[in-house]
Amino acid sequence: MGIISNTGITPGYILRKVLERAQTSAFFRVMVFSDEIGFSKPHRLMFETALKELDAHPSEAIHIGDGLRTDIAGAKAIGMKAIWIKNEETTTSGLYMPDYEVSTLPQVITILSLQASLD
């Protein structure tokens, strides 16, 4: 499991420290931050870097994100499946179509279980 994140004011090295303090960094084998890569999502290098470090092919991965233009478009452009975490303030425009839409994170587990049974 990995993180692909656009960084703004907070650089990747600080985000790593935050995740370590929250005792969640051990759950992620890979962390790709835009300030370290030199590009932001939806640039393909963000996704390709994570996949390379995970030794995974796009067809073997599912990207989970809340940004249609950044997360969903970027993942779909390189052949990954995408789960969009939507909220009541966002709607799909038709330009960026996720494979799945969820409104809560526990719904992701159901989708991942379904995908595992199909593989």
Image (cartoon, helix red, strand yellow):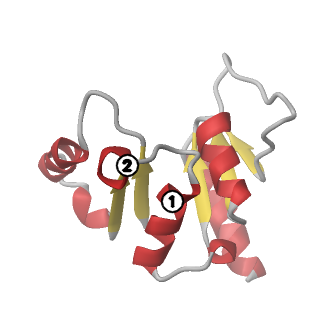
Q: Split into 4 quadrants, where in the image is the N terminus?
A: bottom left
User: Where residue 105 sits in the image (x, y, percent)?
Assistant: 54, 45
Q: Is residue 52 visible?
A: yes
User: Where residue 13 sits in the image (x, y, percent)?
Assistant: 17, 48
Q: Which mark is residue 58?
A: none
Q: Residue at x 60, y 44 (%)?
A: 71
Q: CA distance from mark 2 to mark 1?
A: 9 Å
Q: Could you tell me if the residues under marks 2 and 1 are in contact, i.e. CB atoms within 8 Å?
A: yes
Q: Residue at x 78, y 40 (%)?
A: 96
**Position above or below: 1 against 109:** below
Q: Split into 4 quadrants, where in the image is the C terminus?
A: bottom right
Q: Secondary structure at mark 1?
A: helix
Q: Secondary structure at mark 2?
A: loop
Mark 2: few, some, or many residues within 10 Å (few <14, many ≥20)? few
Residue flagged by tag 1: what amino acid is it?
Leu
What residue is shown with label 1?
Answer: 45
Residue flagged by tag 2: what amino acid is it?
Gly
**Position above or below: 7 against 29:** above
11 left or right of 73 in image: left
User: Where residue 94 sits in the image (x, y, percent)?
Assistant: 87, 34
Q: Is residue 103 visible?
A: no
User: Where residue 95 sits in the image (x, y, percent)?
Assistant: 83, 36
Q: Residue at x 18, y 54 (%)?
A: 23
**Position above or below: 88 against 40:** above
Q: Which mark is residue 38?
A: 2
